[in-house]
Image: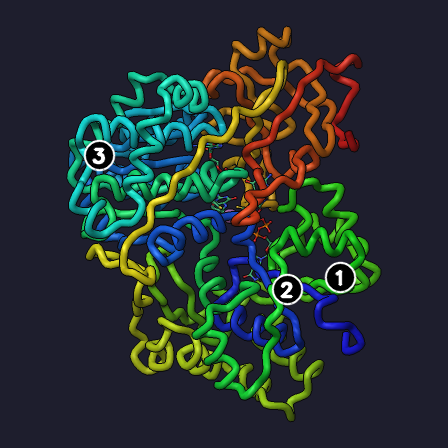
Amino acid sequence: MKSLAADETFWYFSGRSSNEAGFLLQLFARIYGTNNINNCSYYCHQASGVGLTSVTGSGTATLLLEDLEHADLVFVIGGNPASNHPRLMTTLKNIRRRRGKVIVINPVVETGLVNFRVPSDPLSLLLGTRIATQYVQPHIGGDLALFTGIAKRIDEMGAVDHQMLETHCHGWPQLAEFLRSTAWEEICTKSGVAKHEIDQVADTYASAKNVVFSWTMGITHHAHGVQNVQMIAALALMRGMVGRPGSGLLPIRGHSNVQGIGSIGAVPQLKEAFFDRLQNHFGVQLPTTPGLDTLGCMEAAHAGRLKMGFCLGGNLYGSNPDARFAAEALGKLQTLVYLNTTLNTGHAHAVADETILLPVLARDEDPQRTTQESMFNLIRLSDGGPRRHPGPRSEVALIASLAAEVLGNDGPVDWQGLAQTGNIRQAIGAVVPGFEKMAQIDRTAEEFQIEGRTFHQPRFATRDGRAHLHVCPLPESPGGPASLRLMTVRSEGQFNTVVYEDEDIYRGQDRRDVILLNPADMQALGLEADQLVTVRGEAGALHGIRARVFPAIRSGNALMYFPEANVLLPRHTDPVSKTPAFKGAMIQLQADPIDPAARAPCAQRA
Ligand SMILES: Nc1nc2c(c(=O)[nH]1)N[C@H]1C(S)=C(S)[C@@H](COP(=O)(O)OP(=O)(O)OC[C@H]3O[C@@H](n4cnc5c(=O)[nH]c(N)nc54)[C@H](O)[C@@H]3O)O[C@H]1N2
Ligand SMILES: Nc1nc2c(c(=O)[nH]1)N[C@H]1C(S)=C(S)[C@@H](COP(=O)(O)OP(=O)(O)OC[C@H]3O[C@@H](n4cnc5c(=O)[nH]c(N)nc54)[C@H](O)[C@@H]3O)O[C@H]1N2
Ligand SMILES: [Mo]
């Protein structure tokens, strides 16, 4: 490793690790000399971070859990929380019990968002709780047009908060002009939502007092993910729903500590104050190159410009679009180091000349105390716990000894000292803006909130203290004749690329090699229930896929499971956030000619 040029290496972080492990590894990488440092956010909520920062000056939720408990209307956009965020279901149940409303925006009617049995609540467990008060089904990727329509209607109704827009925001005249000049016909065609449904959403919104907008991957996994987020924020600001208690913007996070991993520096570019303090604290000179995002690293590896990858958790192979390309890219590396808690498909399908697999303890098995950050910007110290298996070392112990080995322990950084998580917390408190209280957390054990992120006053973290509204032109409707829009999603039986069971309970599926289609599309394509088809995407094809009748999906759209469907997906990203369009792909279907029973699904390049 010592012989590699620093910029021939990349360092990838999953959002499962502790703040301490993340901080230590990014320090190791930067002192080694590269900014090719990135985390799983690039495939997840990066569009939320970039979009929110461009509006409020901060990339995270603008509210606290208490605010959510006081909302009388919550938008649940582009997510399947019954499977993926079960704790949110209790919050939604409480809102409904208080006669609050829930508007769901999703091309699929997800059973758990219609009626849900909250296990911890006897009444709900017995009778179920009705969740959605209105369920809107746009086309995949139709959300931006839909939000534009809701905003247009709010303006037409004279329901905008002028005080908010004129005193605390920038850009309202331009946005108003855009809304007024965009035709209803374009809005309805591109969103796939009828005018009367849009009016109904606007009416409910205009009469609600405290409104929270929450969203997940149905919003970020698009080539216009950042604009989706900017438009959600604009919609909220138009009625003054940011910058006061009980309301706000809530990107619901995926991994337990993905937010912390970004905050403590597992990103290519550090903010100026962070960078300066990091250099001064350790007395080191750090690289100022731009550094690569995650897909950028995959492409550089494929082009032979990278020689070594170091992955702190995650499954970079399984999570990438264009799976064939991903395997080739990682396969071209000389060295690939994985620090993982369990084996995954990447360890078998994406191996370099030399692949080193280092098992580590999961955060909750760490013998030392570590911290993580919640999606409400709270930092909490946890005690760790007993190990499940003999053998693995903690992430921090392993990274500290690797860094000491590679960079030497006689330089400016005492790597052996940093094997103590308490010492890392001291360093984080000294260098990471907003984390000053980290330096005392070992003594106080008190959770603390990061400054400048929750807005209970209309004073934002932008240079001028105002929120910035953006005009987001509507993307062209994709596709040609006979093509469908494809979403690739999680089932109940998986955690990301690790599949535990084939069954997807709420969607009523017993297997994963399926494509779920609206009956109207099945009929138009001349397909029978469970007929085997070839699905062609821009990057590849899958044969022997079962076409399933699924009335819950909006016609013109199809659903398949990630990660198997990743062979189909091209490497198209949102140009600003670099997040792949995992939900915005176009596909074509063709009935398989061969005897159904004889074929098993297999992948092939298009
Ligand atoms: N059990 C379990 N929990 C998890 C995970 C897991 O794999 N398993 N993964 C974690 C992680 S990392 C994440 S990021 C989250 C993901 O949580 P989600 O975002 O809920 O997960 P997905 O399955 O990717 O998202 C699919 C939802 O978006 C909808 N959707 C698809 N396209 C569109 C669109 O264009 N517009 C709209 N409005 N909706 C759309 C789909 O119908 C589906 O309901 O879950 C986290 N929690
Ligand atoms: N087509 C399509 N592709 C997608 C998505 C999609 O919806 N559709 N979703 C995207 C999203 S949102 C995400 S977040 C990615 C995630 O995709 P992945 O990278 O698969 O997700 P992870 O859960 O981060 O990684 C799982 C691995 O992390 C390791 N691990 C778990 N806990 C720890 C720990 O504490 N420490 C360490 N060192 N390792 C640990 C385990 O070994 C496990 O194998 O996939 C993305 N790819
Ligand atoms: Mo994610």
Say whether mark 1 is within 8 Å of ligand 2.
no
List the residue tagged with mark 3: 96
Disc ID at residue 542? none
Quarter of the figure with residue 446: bottom left
Coloring applied to the structure? rainbow
Amino acid type of the residue tagged 3 in the rendering: Arg
Amino acid type of the residue tagged 2 in the rendering: Asn
SS for callout 1: loop
Amino acid type of the residue tagged 1 in the rendering: Leu
Whether label 2 touches label 1, CB < 8 Å: yes
Q: Is 359 on the left-hand or right-hand side of 165?
A: right
SS for callout 2: loop
Q: Which of the pair 489/342 is nearer the observer?
A: 489
Q: Spatial distance from mark 2 to mark 1, Cα to Cα? A: 10 Å
Above or below — where is 481 with respect to 167? above
SS for callout 3: helix
In the rendering, at what x and y percent does residue 249 appear? 31, 47
Q: Which residue extends farthest bottom?
A: 410
| Placement of the C terminus among the 4 image quadrants | top right
In the rendering, at what x and y percent does residue 456 appear? 21, 56
Say whether mark 3 is within 8 Å of ligand 1.
no
Report whether residue 357 is seen.
no
Q: Earlier in the sequence, mark 1 or mark 3?
A: 3
In the rendering, at what x and y percent does residue 180 appear? 31, 28
Q: Which of the pair 245/358 is nearer the observer?
A: 245
Above or below — where is 80 with respect to 49? above
List the residue tagged with mark 1: 306
